[in-house]
C-alpha cells in the first residue's frame, strides 16, 4: 500500500490526478495484499478495483503461487518484478513473451533496501525502477514523494535505493536495445 500511495503523491507533484487504495483478500496475517494506483490527466471518478492495469509491480515472488499476477494486464503493459534475476531464470519467461521489449524489468529491490536502509522493504526501490521503466512519473517526483514520507532516519537510504534501482533499470533497458 505504501508504494501505491507514494506513486500517487509523485503523480500529484506533477499536477496530475491520482488515487491509491488497497484490496485485501482474506483477513489473515501474511495474506496477499493488492494495491492499486490510478493516474490520469483528468479527474478520476472510478472507485472500483483496477481490472485491466497498464502496469503491475510484483513485490513478492511468492504471489506467483497464490494468484495469477498477470490477470487482466493490458497487452503492451509493463511488468516490474522485485527479483535478483531475470524472468527466464525465474521460470516465467514464457508467460512474459506477449509483452513488448522494454516493458519488463527485474530489480533486486529488497536487496537494495536491505543495503541502504537495513531492512528488506522494497517500496522506494521499486518506485525508482517503475519511473525508469514506464515514464508514467519522473524519478524526481518519486524522490520528492519519498522525501515527504520518510523521516530523517530513513529518507536518505530510501532515496539511495530508489536512485540505484532507477539506474539499474536504465542499464537493463539500455543493454537490451544494444543486443
Image (cartoon, rainbow, N blue to C red):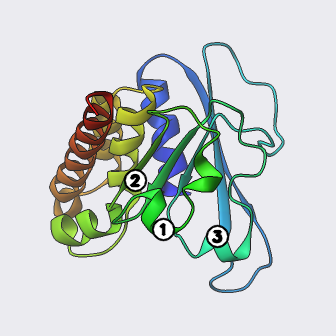
- Left or right: residue 43 compared with residue 93: right
Identify the residue under disc 3: 64
Where residue 100 appears, as percent x and y from the top left, is 55, 32
Category of crowding for the residue at label 3, using alpha-carbon neighbours closer than 10 angstroms: few (below 14), some (14–19), many (at least 20)? few
Which numbered disc, 3 or 1, marks the residue that appears first in the sequence? 3
The residue that mark 1 highlights is 90
Judge whether 26 appears above or below 22 on screen. below
Judge whether 33 appears above or below 55 on screen. below
Which residue is label 2 attached to? 106
Q: Which structural element holds mark 2?
A: strand
Give the left or right position of residue 143, taking residue 21 as reference.
left
Question: How many angstroms separate mark 3 from mark 1 (CA)?
Answer: 10 Å
Question: In the picture provided, is 172 more to the left or to the right than 86?
Answer: left
Say which of marks 3 and 1 sits in front: 1
> In the rendering, at what x and y percent does residue 89 appear?
43, 66
Asked if the residue under mark 1 is in contact with the one under mark 2, i.e. CB atoms within 8 Å, the reply is: yes
- Distance Cα–Cα, label 3 vs label 2: 15 Å
Amino acid at each position: 500500500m505504501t508504494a501505491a500511495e507514494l506513486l500517487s503523491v509523485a503523480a500529484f507533484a506533477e499536477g496530475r490526478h491520482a488515487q491509491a487504495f488497497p484490496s485485501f483478500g482474506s483477513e489473515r496475517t501474511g495474506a496477499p495484499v493488492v494495491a492499486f494506483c490510478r493516474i490520469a490527466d483528468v479527474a478520476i471518478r472510478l472507485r472500483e478495483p483496477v481490472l485491466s492495469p497498464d502496469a503491475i509491480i510484483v513485490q513478492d515472488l511468492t504471489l506467483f503461487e497464490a494468484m495469477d499476477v498477470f490477470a487482466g494486464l493490458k497487452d503492451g503493459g509493463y511488468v516490474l518484478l522485485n527479483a535478483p534475476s531475470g524472468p527466464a531464470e525465474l521460470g516465467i519467461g514464457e508467460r512474459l513473451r506477449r509483452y513488448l521489449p522494454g516493458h519488463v524489468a527485474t530489480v533486486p529491490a529488497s536487496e537494495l533496501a536491505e543495503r541502504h536502509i537495513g531492512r528488506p522493504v522494497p517500496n522506494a526501490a521499486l518506485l525508482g525502477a517503475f519511473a525508469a521503466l514506464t515514464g508514467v512519473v519522473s524519478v524526481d517526483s518519486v524522490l520528492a514523494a519519498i522525501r515527504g514520507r520518510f523521516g530523517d532516519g530513513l529518507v536518505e537510504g530510501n532515496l539511495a535505493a530508489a536512485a540505484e534501482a532507477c539506474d539499474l533499470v536504465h542499464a537493463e533497458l539500455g543493454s537490451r536495445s544494444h543486443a
